[in-house]
Image (tube, rainbow, N blue to C red):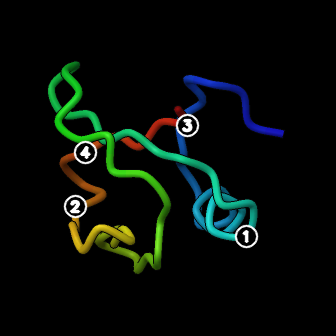
Amino acid sequence: MYSSGSTLRTSADFDNAIMFGLKIEVWQDEAIIDYAGVIESHTNDSVSFMNESRYLKATCEFRVR
């Protein structure tokens, strides 16, 4: 469904990443800032990971590992 390097853009993308337990990387300004792992939850504004980190959707890009 989502290949390595695919970017999560829609609420459905984030919901699917949670449902399928996809491992996600967080990017900012074309550089990886965290190999965050599995998403725990998301809102319209942010994404929370199992490792207790949280990132803003407006400033970050979320890619499948």
**Where is residue 30 shown, x and y percent of the image?**
22, 19
Residue position marked by numbered label 3 in the rendering: 64
Q: Residues within 10 Å of mark 4 (few under 14, many from 20)?
A: some
Q: Distance between the residues labelled 4 and 1?
A: 21 Å
Residue 28 vertical placement versus 13 (above, below): above
Q: Residue at x 21, y 67 (%)?
A: 53
SS class of the residue under badge 3? Answer: strand
Of the numbered discs 4 and 1, the one sitting upstream in the chain is 1
Q: Residue 60: which disc? A: 4
**Where is residue 1 shown, x and y percent of the image?**
84, 40
Q: Nearer the viewer, mark 3 or mark 4?
A: 3
| Location of residue 19 by image quarter | bottom right
Confirm or deny contact between disc 1 and disc 3 (CB under 8 A). Answer: no
Q: Residue at x 59, y 67 (%)?
A: 11
Q: Residue 19: which disc? A: 1
**Where is residue 4 shown, x and y percent of the image?**
62, 25
Q: Residues within 10 Å of mark 3 (few under 14, many from 20)?
A: some
Q: Distance between the residues labelled 3 and 2?
A: 15 Å
Q: Which residue is drawn at 43% across and 52% down?
A: 37
Of the numbered discs 4 and 2, the one sitting upstream in the chain is 2
- Three-letter residue code for mark 1: Met
Of the numbered discs 2 and 1, the one sitting upstream in the chain is 1
- Three-letter residue code for mark 2: Tyr
- Three-letter residue code for mark 4: Cys
Q: How far apart are marks 4 and 2 (CA)?
A: 7 Å
Q: Residue 55: which disc? A: 2
Q: Distance between the residues labelled 2 and 1?
A: 19 Å
